[in-house]
Amino acid sequence: MEQEQFVHSPMDSRIELARNPEKTGEAVELTPGAFRALEIWQARPGEVMTVTAPDGTLFRGRLLGERGAIHGVLCFENMGRIPAEVSVHLCQALPEKERFELVMEKAVELGINGIHPFVSRRSATLAMRDASQKKSHRWPHLVRRASRQCRRADVPALYPVADWASVLLLAEKAGLCLVLDEREKEFSFMDGLSAYRQGDVVLIVGPEGGLDREEVRALRGAGALPVTLGPRILRTETAAIVASALIRHCLK
């Protein structure tokens, strides 16, 4: 069973203006590259979106066009400059029921750049998730909808469900990789964040029951740092949301 592909650079999904508006209420044409972004958003004329000016200023504007052809944006609200942020990727072991949908929605709202569902020894699989009713084909729609709701200027990438080898590779390439481990006693989550120097941050969250000890050892060998969110045992979706929020709050 295959998941719909929805992999792109978040930068490619920014709807870019050809120039900065001189005043609010002005119609501004789009760059040629904006049409790729409109495809990612599945945008339509008349929709209100967050768009990006050449100097990095964000505007709210209404898409102008007819019969599906969008040619410009009526800019009516200046939202300020794009904040400089660390690129953060969330690797979430597939949970049961609707929990992954909740994680995706909140990850989008919190500004996560890439979402990587994966399969571990204790997690659900895509086949298990879609056995009674296929829902994974709706995941890209959920990501787009959440991006619209929180007025993001871009759409985070949603990657196909990864195997364990792919997770280890992500850990190896990250500037900082944190893995939530309920058995970790020495390093807190904030200790882990203090180790950040540069590059992408990868956050790995296990399934209900956590990653097994062999998996944690393999991640440690790949350069990941096991950390704890505290003495309470959190549900996987709670842990993912809390940790994502802390990264966004602490790393600018």
Image: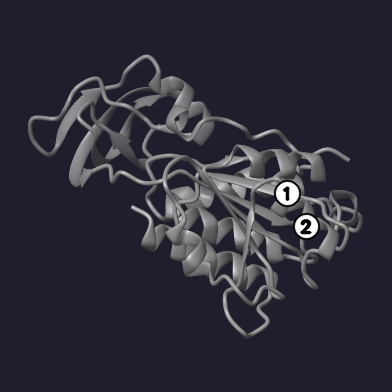
Q: Is any part of residue 123 visible from this angle?
A: no
Which residue position is annotated with label 2?
Answer: 217
Please tell me which residue is depicted at 74% across the width and 57% down the height of the picture.
Answer: 93
Amino acid type at image mark 2: Arg
Is 140 on the left or on the right of 80, as rendered?
A: right
For label 1, the crowd category at 10 Å Cα-Cα, with few meaning under 14, some 14 to 19 and many 20 or more, is few
Q: Position of residue 222 (x, y in %)?
A: 70, 45
From this viewpoint, is residue 93 visible? yes
The residue that appears at 27% across and 25% down in the rendered structure is 17
Residue type pointed to by label 1: Gly
View extreme (left): residue: 23
Q: Secondary structure at mark 2?
A: helix
Q: Secondary structure at mark 1?
A: helix
User: Which residue occupies 82% across, 64% down?
Assistant: 213
Q: Nearer the viewer, residue 65 or 109?
A: 109
The colour scheme used to paint the residues is one colour
Residue 190 at what x, y percent from top left? 47, 68
Q: Are marks 2 and 1 in contact (CB under 8 Å)?
A: yes
Question: In the picture provided, is 20 more to the left or to the right than 125?
Answer: left
Distance from Cα at disc 2 to Cα at disc 1: 6 Å
Q: Mark 1 = which residue?
A: 221
Q: Position of residue 131 (x, y in %)?
A: 91, 55
- The answer to which image quadrant residue 169 occupies is top right
